[in-house]
Amino acid sequence: MPHSTGSTDRTAHGAARFQTTHWSVVLKAGQGAEEALVKLCRNYWLPLYRFSRRRGHPVHEAQDLTQEFFAHLLANRGFATVAPRGGRFRSFLLVALKHFLTNEWHKKQALKRGGGQQLISWEELSAGDRDAIEPASEAYPEKIYDREWALTLLGRVMKQLEKECVAAGKKELFHALKDYLTDSGAQTYRQLAGQLGLSEGAVKVSVHRLRRRFGELVREQVEKTVANPDEIDDEIRELFAALN
């Protein structure tokens, strides 16, 4: 039956997509997936660094610990006793980092600056970025971590969306409407229409399409971080809750 075939196709498609989740990259570490794992390390470096800072480690010590943590992850050692929590990659990383900090940070023989493998150059971050990741609130370390994870993920989504709009010749439209993806923006649609030389209806349609694509990209990003599709919606809710 048509319904059955469609369901089978969606199941097969979902199974195929989940072959390339963050989990699969980690599990294949040491089997040709090092480049992908380094990329994951870059994506999660700031959230984990901020967690270390909120745990009381000074700037340079937190940098060292975060670099060393990922050096161990790249070497695929030190995490045999750490099981994923709830099937979510960010939870796995946080549990793994806590385990690492408890067992490794105090060891004087820990290699300086991430064991010689500097995954992220601190100097690559702008002054504003550095200030933004310093602890400036009384929030629990876990909340700081979740918020930074959410900002990092949404940052990747925005970059991808901008890239797509530029490729489609809609760079100006993207920059005019990007503030309307998660908020109402500072101008009315009528004001935007005058600014862009479009009708008010065209602006509304453009905002709707941009929001829809934004939602699709968020879902695609989150899909890579959970162990099964049933957790996607909950993770998306937690993503936006972390920003409040």
Image: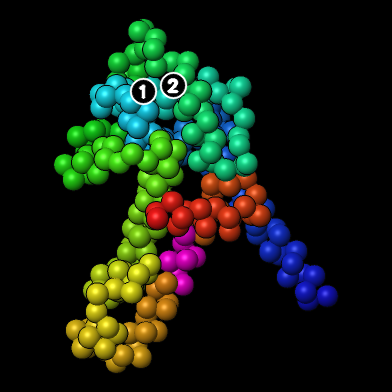
| Viewer-closest of 89 and 18 | 89
Q: Secondary structure at mark 2?
A: helix
Name which residue lies at 37% across and 78% down: 207
Report if residue 210 is visible in the image.
Answer: yes
Q: Quadrant of residue 69?
A: top left
Q: Tag 2: residue type?
A: Leu
Marks 1 and 2 close (CB-CB < 8 Å): yes
The image shows residue 72 at horizontal and vertical percentages of: 46, 22
Q: Is residue 74 visible?
A: no
Q: Position of residue 58 (x, y in %)?
A: 27, 24
| Main secondary structure type of the part rendered in magenta | helix
Determine the residue positioned at 42% across, 72% down: 211
According to the image, label 1 marks what residue? 65
**Residue hosting label 2:** 101
Using residue 130 as the reference point, say whether residue 183 is left or right of it.
right
The magenta stretch is 212-218
**Residue 140 colored in magenta in the image:** no
